[in-house]
Amino acid sequence: MGGSENPKSAVVGSLVETIKEISGLPECQNVHKRMCGNMVRRVKLLSPLFEELKDSDESLSDEQLGGFESLRVALDSTLTLLKSVNQGSKVYQV
């Protein structure tokens, strides 16, 4: 692959994968159940948008790519947070 990969494909593909990973997490069973459920549900709503962008032939401007890159960072943080709530230490969860 190297540097020949399209920046749009890289960013959008990464977003699609992160959304799939978040969607595949087990349902939270602790005091954060409602909050985590709402967050996962809202992230899942983004999936059709990014699937459509992934399949689209339209290019994205540098500004749009920057925005999607920021969203990718936020979703990666969301994934980390949800994993820690589900699988982290009980003390950390409180």
Image (cartoon, helix red, strand yellow):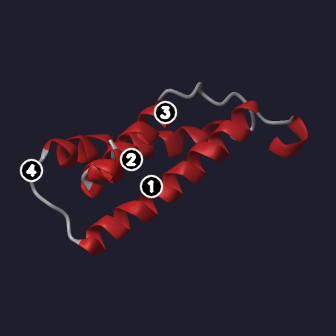
Q: Is residue 68 visible?
A: yes
Q: Looking at numbered disc 4 in the image, what kind of residue is underneath it?
A: Asp
Ranked by sequence position, the earlier of labels 2 and 4 is 2
Ranked by sequence position, the earlier of labels 1 and 2 is 2
Residue that sits furthest to the right in the current view: 91
Could you tell me residue 94's position as x and y percent?
85, 45
Q: Is residue 94 visible?
A: no
Q: Residue at x 74, y 31 (%)?
A: 87
Q: Answer yes or no: do the residues labelled 1 and 2 have beta carbons within 8 Å?
A: yes
Query: Could you say whether the residue bearing mark 4 is in a helix, strand or loop?
Result: loop
Q: CA distance from mark 3 to mark 4?
A: 25 Å
Q: Residue at x 42, y 33 (%)?
A: 20
Left/right placement of residue 7 relative to residue 76 reads left
Q: Quadrant of residue 61?
A: bottom left
Q: Which residue is mark 4?
A: 57
Ranked by sequence position, the earlier of labels 1 and 4 is 4
Q: Which residue is mark 2?
A: 15
Query: Could you say whether the residue bearing mark 2 is in a helix, strand or loop?
Result: helix
* Disc 3 packing (10 Å; few <14; some 14–19; many ≥20): few
Q: Which residue is mark 3?
A: 21
Q: CA distance from mark 1 to mark 4?
A: 21 Å
Q: Residue at x 40, y 62 (%)?
A: 69
Q: Quadrant of residue 48?
A: top left
Q: Looking at numbered disc 3 in the image, what kind of residue is underneath it?
A: Glu
Query: Could you say whether the residue bearing mark 1 is in a helix, strand or loop?
Result: helix
Q: CA distance from mark 2 to mark 4?
A: 17 Å
Left/right placement of residue 24 relative to residue 77 reads left
Residue that sits furthest to the left in the current view: 57
Front in this rendered view, residue 23 or 53: 53
